[in-house]
Image (tube, rainbow, N blue to C red):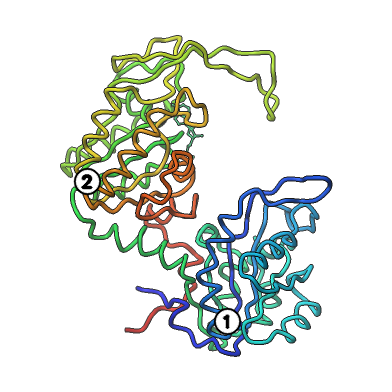
Amino acid sequence: MAKLTVNDLEVRGKRVFVRVDYNVPMAEQNGQMVINDDTRIRATLPTLDLLIKGGARIILTAHLGRPDGKPEPTMSLRPVAAKLADLVGRPVAFVDDCIGEKVEKTVGALKDGDIVLLENTRFYAGEEANDAGFAEQLAKVAEHYVNDAFGAAHRGHASTEGVARIVAKRGGKCAAGLLMERELQFLGDELENPARPFVVILGGAKVSDKIKVIDRLLEKADTILIGGAMAYTFKLAQGLRVGKSLVEPDKTDVASAAVDKAAEKKVDFLIPSDNVVARPVKTDKLNKKGKPVIELHDHRVNAEPNIPDDLEGVDIGPATVKSFCDVIAKAKTILWNGPMGIFEDKRFADGTFAVARAVAETTKNNGAKSIIGGGDSVKAINNAGLGDQVTFMSTGGGASLEFLEGAVLPGVAALSDKKI
Ligand code: AMP
């Protein structure tokens, strides 16, 4: 059922508890934590503008990093308050706790349109445990609840779920923020009855991470294009050789079942016919996990489906790029999740960037709706400078995958249903 949105709330003079996703990348510079990328902060501005104009007293909560239930100065949200103040052009108060007297006092002094950001909710173990007592303490200052943190909605934590339940029980309203609303619209409603052809592009590391998504999309898609390392598990399932490629040999049965289902549902299911390959060479250097760094040498196109025993598949090849892009060009709806190769390395990024360009061009030339399902594909589209040329880019990684699988996200389920 459709969820209430922040547009449906009467907020003037009300204390509105807003869960946002301010889990921004930070780095230490001269002893201070500095925000490297403020995209997630900017993404909340439409909801905040609406609440400010509506005269709400805004209490922002978020998590940052994994402090494991105790205060960790490098994971404080204080720098975010300063950044947000710059972006909204008005003061943003900060409280160095998320529960207790200090919070109550600051919230009590808020005037209509004022904003306070509370400290990292994960400084308490009760947050991730969704502890009822902790959620009660958080909810103490809340009259209404808004969730704009789609990226955290797959977590049933105190600030994403527990507080909403308490607010609703007290007769308050629980609504989706504008960012959350768009996520639900594009990853949900738009894909229920997609304009056809509906082309799904899936890549990334593992079949096991995405098999539930594949299974669900086989019910809806006209064509599924498989790239990335997960294509090698499909190759293996077909009896092809994959050399030293990243592969999940214990998932070939799952891959075969997906191919069978595609045939039954008359979904075109394409895996790469050629690949870029490279020779993995173990070095003396160790990575962060203490394992030897593997360098990839002598990359070249391998023009046939089998990959030689001493080589590793690192990208889709030019023939595959062409056949994938031809399919994409005819699409009216496109969903993309996961890169076609190890795109972080420029040598192996051609396939991913070619797909990114094809998605952007088809959006423009064919009026297709293009939906980028979070994580690395969003990074790839942005790296290609095409971020403003697709219809929608999800802000969720794990959350968008779980949502596409058809899972009920706890942070969404806890929102009030819209009464029609
Ligand atoms: P995912 O989070 O599952 O979307 O996976 C993204 C990761 O898959 C990226 O870090 C890519 O480098 C990696 N990846 C894509 N293709 C390959 C490949 N052929 N071999 C190894 N890793 C790959």
Q: Are marks 1 and 2 in contact (CB under 8 Å)?
A: no
Quadrant of the image containing the C terminus: bottom left
Residue nearer the viewer, 394 or 163: 394
Q: Would residue 3 appear left or right of 137 to someone viewing this image?
A: left
Give the image location of residue 45, x and y in percent.
Answer: 54, 67
Please tell me in which quadrant of the rendered image residue 129 appears. bottom right
> SS at mark 1?
helix
- The kind of residue tagged 1 is Val
- Determine whether the beta carbon of the residue marked 2 sits less than 8 angstroms from the nearest atom of ligand 1: no
Q: Relative to residue 262, is residue 105 depicted above or below?
A: below
Give the image location of residue 185, x and y in percent.
Answer: 36, 64
Q: Residue at image x 45%, y 17%?
A: 312
Instruction: Check residue 167 in the rendering and tell me which mark sits there, or answer none.
Output: 1
Residue nearer the viewer, 415 or 255: 415
Q: Relative to residue 266, is residue 285 depicted above or below?
A: above
Q: Relative to residue 145, is residue 396 depicted above or below?
A: above
Give the image location of residue 370, x and y in percent.
Answer: 32, 51
> SS at mark 2?
loop
Q: Residue at image x 53%, y 16%?
A: 296
- The kind of residue tagged 2 is Ala
Please tell me in which quadrant of the rendered image residue 419 appears. bottom left
Instruction: Check residue 331 in the rendering and tell me which mark sits there, or answer none.
Output: 2
Which of pointers 1 and 2 lies earlier in the amino acid sequence?
1
Q: Would residue 13 appear left or right of 224 to someone viewing this image?
A: right
Q: Would residue 11 appear left or right of 185 to someone viewing this image?
A: right
Q: Residue at image x 63%, y 83%?
A: 57
